[in-house]
Amino acid sequence: MTSVTLVRRIRARPPIVFDAVTTAEGIAQWWGPDSGPVLMAEADVRVGGRYRLRFRMLDGTEHETTGTYLELLRPERAVMSWRWTGGIEDPGESRIEIVLRPIPEGTELTFSHSRLHDEDTRRSHEAGWTGSLRKLEALFTDPAAPAREA
Amino acid sequence: MVNHQERLGRTFAALVDPTRRAILAQLERRGGTSISELAAPFAIKLPAVMKHLDVLADAGLVTRSKAGRTVTVRLRAQPMRAAMEWLRHYERFWSSRLDRLARYAEDQEVKARSEKR
């Protein structure tokens, strides 16, 4: 239930966007949280391969994100695991899914980061309910939330 | 002391169950409600409703106060707001990165086109 989804329209063809999203050269350009320098970017771009990115933020702290490529279907879809290592809070392993769709001006990119809260995600799957930001918001606006047998 | 992550974990775990979400939705509409009034629309027994209320109370999403023989249940929205804020934080986090990704990919597209010529 803990996921965020963002959609962007990009004036570039899907294969170009796909490489920007998956290759070491590409992720080094955009993955870091601010405009601090990327210190290291490695990516073994194949299913089961790992990526690792180390960067320094403007406040001087250094951080690393790592993960594994779970699905790669160029130029349509990429799924990877994602986790912070080193320093700041470690909320466990989460999942990033990127879907690319060709549109006249280039590519529509749908980015979702899910399983942001591992333990709860497991439970939500057990309960047969995978929500989203919108569903969570609807909790207090939808008067007809279903009552089911506990 | 319960840390922020643990608190969020409890909030999300409490919200996973559809009956608990329905209980919260009812409380949102009605304000303070007795447990028997609260249980009336559900096809489950009172003890089951009490168990759900325990989970919601542990997550800080409801408060219970006793006056005589009546227990009144009220909604507490702060943990919910914290949970929403946490998700919004991630949304902002990625939003700025995707802006950079778009700029980079668009530059690459321009380069690819000029190399072809």
Image (cartoon, rainbow, N blue to C red):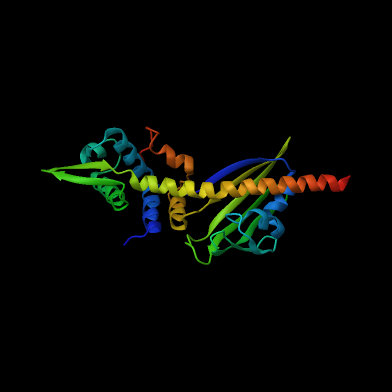
Using the rendered image of the protein, determine whether residue A15 is visible from the camera's viewpoint.
no
Left or right of A53: which side holds A148? left
Which residue occupies 46% across, 40% down? A135
Residue A97 percent location from the top left of the image: 60, 50
Q: Looking at this rendering, what residue extends furthest in the right direction?
A: B117
Q: Looking at this rendering, what residue extends furthest in the left direction?
A: B68
Q: Is residue A87 above or below residue A111?
A: below
Q: How many marks?
A: 0
Using the rendered image of the protein, determine whether residue A96 is visible from the camera's viewpoint.
yes
Nearest the viewer among A11 and A136 is A11
Residue A81 percent location from the top left of the image: 58, 58
Which residue occupies 47% across, 48% down? B87
Residue A96 percent location from the top left of the image: 58, 53
Left or right of A38: which side holds B91? left
Nearest the viewer among B16 and A140 is A140
Q: Looking at this rendering, what residue extends furthest in the front direction?
A: A59
Nearest the viewer among A15 and A48 is A15
Residue B71 percent location from the top left of the image: 18, 43
Which residue occupies 89% across, 44% down? B117
